[in-house]
Image (cartoon, rainbow, N blue to C red):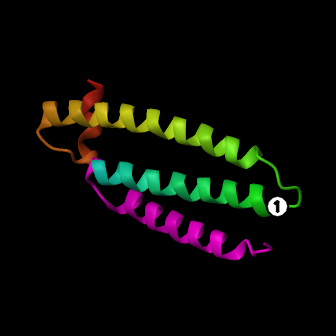
Amino acid sequence: MSGSITPYLMLAAILFCIGLFGALTKKNGVVVLLSVELMLNAVNLNLVAFSKFGAIPSLTGQIFTLFNISIAAVEVAIGIAILILLYRNKGTADVTEIDSMKR
């Protein structure tokens, strides 16, 4: 079962570019968080692909992927908590209003 790593890397690059575009252009906080998750999933795909098709196949990339998934879950929980506070204070989920929460 010899395969090529190229399709996995191309898919990961496309996912990362879509996530980066969403994170940089959208103003809704939930969409920004979803875009960051897309970028993290692209990284996870790269880690798994390199662990399977790398010079020395091992489980290291898959272990890093599990660690990355757990960190992403914590990031989403904290991000949603910040967005809920922003919505309670300002009545909007616009990320440009976040700078006013520091007072």
Q: Residue at x 61, y 37 (%)?
A: 67
* Residue 38 picture location, percent across and down: 46, 57
Name the one closer to the observer, 5 or 96: 5
Q: Find out whether residue 13 is within the magenta segment.
A: yes
24 relative to 5, above or below:
above
From the image, which quarter does the C terminus lie in? Answer: top left
Say what amino acid the circle numbered 1 marks: Gly
Which image quadrant is residue 7 in? Answer: bottom right
Which sits in the foreground, 96 or 31?
31
Q: Quadrant of residue 80?
A: top left
In the image as oriented, which residue stretches furthest toward the left?
91
Q: Main secondary structure of the magenta part?
A: helix
Q: Position of residue 50 (x, y in %)?
A: 75, 59
- Residue designated by label 1: 54
Q: What's drawn in magenta, residue-wise?
A: 1-29
- Tell me where residue 56 appears, x and y as whole percent: 88, 56
> What residue sits 14% from the left and 36% below the top?
90
